[in-house]
Image (cartoon, rainbow, N blue to C red):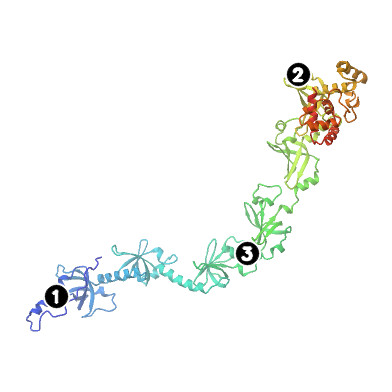
Amino acid sequence: MVRACLEPFVPPQEPYMTESMNPSSDDFASMFESSAAASAMQEGQVVPATVIRIENDAVLVDIGLKTEGRIPLREFSMEDKQPESGDIVDVYLDRIENALGDAVLSRDKARREERWIKLEKSFNANEPVKGAISGRVKGGFTVDLGGVNAFLPGSQVDIRPVRDVGPLMGEVQPFAVLKLDRSRGNIVVSRRAILEESRAEQRAEIVSDMAEGDVRKGIVKNITDYGAFVDLGGIDGLLHVTDMSYKRINHPSQVVEVGQEVEVQIIKINPETQRISLGMKQLGADPWDGIDVRYPVGARLKGIVTNITDYGAFVELEDGVEGLIHVSEMSWTKKNVHPGKILSTSQEVDVEVLDVDSEKRRISLGLKQTMDNPWSAFLAEHPIGTEIEGEVRGITEFGLFVGLGPDLDGMVHINDISWDQSGDQAIEAYNKGDMVKAKVLDVDVDKERISLGIKQLAGDPMESLNTGGGVKRGSTVTCTVTEITSGGIEVEFGEPAMKSFIRRSDLSRDRADQRPERFAVGDKVDAKVIQVDRGSRRVSLSIKALEIAEEAEAVAQYGSADAGASLGDILGAALASSGSSKEEAAPAEDSGDVDANGRLSAPQEQADDLKQIKGVGPAFEKKLNEAGIFHFWQIASMSDEQLATLEEEVGTSGKGADWKAEAEALQG
């Protein structure tokens, strides 16, 4: 398209010659000026032309050149009226002279130039222009803007997709100019922008008449997965699925359908986006009002399972009121099972109300609470101490799981399998599927645990030994040698048998006799119990401590070796006087000046340095002397009751057993 670059040519108004037809100097001047003006015209200009006459299908016009110009009559079809002789019209000078010597003129091109100027003004002023959709092209349509073609993208035809554009073809209507590039002859227009602007004005006017809380009637226009759009008379509002009903709705089509007239309440209006949120359930009574009174904690109700998820099941208690049974509240015994394997949708169930939160609109329900607690029932039928029998269902590193019914298991801890074997050794004797007997040790209903013990069926050997009611510190036991090692001997004693190890240093008082090889497997030996650790199930024995105690007892009764009698004479006299075994000899505290509590009024010979006992300083030694304790053997021979009395007297607590062990060692 060629842009006009010169001012329109104005033909001379003065006559070329005078009335006498004899040119004067003025006539020549006028003719010269007209000739100069005609030569100033250039191709590509819009110039004014005078209509001379109409011949057939052409309009003859005069633009001030030597020849007349001819313009096809059809180019004037878009004019308001047909041209007449004497009319002044703008034409486009395409060529000054063609092969026939005529000027090539165009009314269409002139009109197009005029239109481009107007379009540029409208585009700069952001004003709409009028045009008509004239044809279809790839990606959209062409629009005739009064002699200038523009492109209308398919997305800019209407606010919503239009399937049939036929009714819009040829209809003159406003368009918004989105893009204009005159150098390339490129124009992009939009019908949608005009409609949106009109719609925005209409929406603003309608919204101004609305208020939150108003109740309106509307027509359902469209349904989606998340709600329905309702036409409120020129403006749409969204009715969300959660605002359709207080009860659970899986899809909006369960409540409304397209074309249905509904009554809704305006919940919220966004003044910036002019979006309107609607609700239907707000028109009815809220079933959650007074929920605390209708469903108190602890109440048992019936409900219908409406939905099952990975974390639980929703149960409808009434229209619009649902509660959740968490997976942890479904069964006493089935802990890692999907809720769908316990319940099914539409199933009627009995539930118990566990918690109600009216603000968050949540009700926690329990299913297992409506059933008997199997742990409470088991405890009622099997009190602690009852013997049971069950199948080994599982073996772990910390114990055995024993089946106690279809849904209950009890655990035998690894330390409760055997008295004399370590847990790792004892558990190797059992396999999955074995039938075992055990004793019920504990039932924790709150933690849902049942503790069993296998070793408890045989009783505690430390309590059942034939040694006067059990193993006590200071008592003497008869042992059978079961194994000999370089560090000592392993022995077995009591009924049921208990094992212990006598260290090499405890085999005899005399160093020369501290040889394990002087014993043989099966030998019977007497030893003294020097320590009992009931926690670790260990009993420490010493032959050396027994010999020291027997010597001290003999010396206390029959005199000292320093008084002229040998140790053999003293022991011989002691055995002869008793006429019985050394186990039946009279205790040292019953002879001499020792009273019934093992106290002396004064030290026998030189008193021992009691400060050698760990934990006894000068102050405690003084208190011990004041209490009649001067020798190691006195403390070593005391009973538990005597030690307890001594502790209370000297003002210590729990030290007596340690002092006794130290005293026994210091005697040697």
Q: Identify the secondary structure beneath mark 3.
A: loop
Neighbourhood count class around disc 1 (C-alpha, 10 Å): few under 14, some 14–19, many 20 upward: many
Neighbourhood count class around disc 3 (C-alpha, 10 Å): few under 14, some 14–19, many 20 upward: many
Report the amino acid beneath label 3: Tyr
Decide: is 473 above or below 150: above
Neighbourhood count class around disc 2 (C-alpha, 10 Å): few under 14, some 14–19, many 20 upward: many
Horizontally, residue 582 falls left or right of residue 108, namely right
Horizontally, residue 7 falls left or right of residue 528, namely left
Residue 266, picture quadrant: bottom right
Decide: is 403 above or below 598: below
Residue 401, picture quadrant: top right
Q: Which residue is mark 3?
A: 246
Q: Identify the secondary structure beneath mark 1.
A: helix
Q: Of marks 1 and 2, which one's residue comes earlier in the chain?
A: 1
Viewer-nearest of discs 1 and 3: 1
Give coordinates of residue 24: x percent, y percent: 7, 80
Distance between the alpha carbons at the discs numbered 1 and 3: 91 Å
Horizontally, residue 199 falls left or right of residue 172, namely right
**Contact, mark 2 vs mark 3 (Cβ under 8 Å):** no
Q: Residue at x 83, y 36 (%)?
A: 648
Task: Work out whether residue 485 can be spotted.
Answer: yes
Q: Which residue is mark 1?
A: 34
Distance between the alpha carbons at the discs numbered 2 and 3: 88 Å
Horizontally, residue 239 falls left or right of residue 127, namely right
Q: Residue furthest left?
A: 22
Q: Residue at x 70, y 34 (%)?
A: 431
Report the amino acid beneath label 1: Ser
User: Which of 286/126 is in front?
Assistant: 126
Q: Of marks 1 and 3, which one's residue comes earlier in the chain?
A: 1
Label of residue 516 in the image: 2
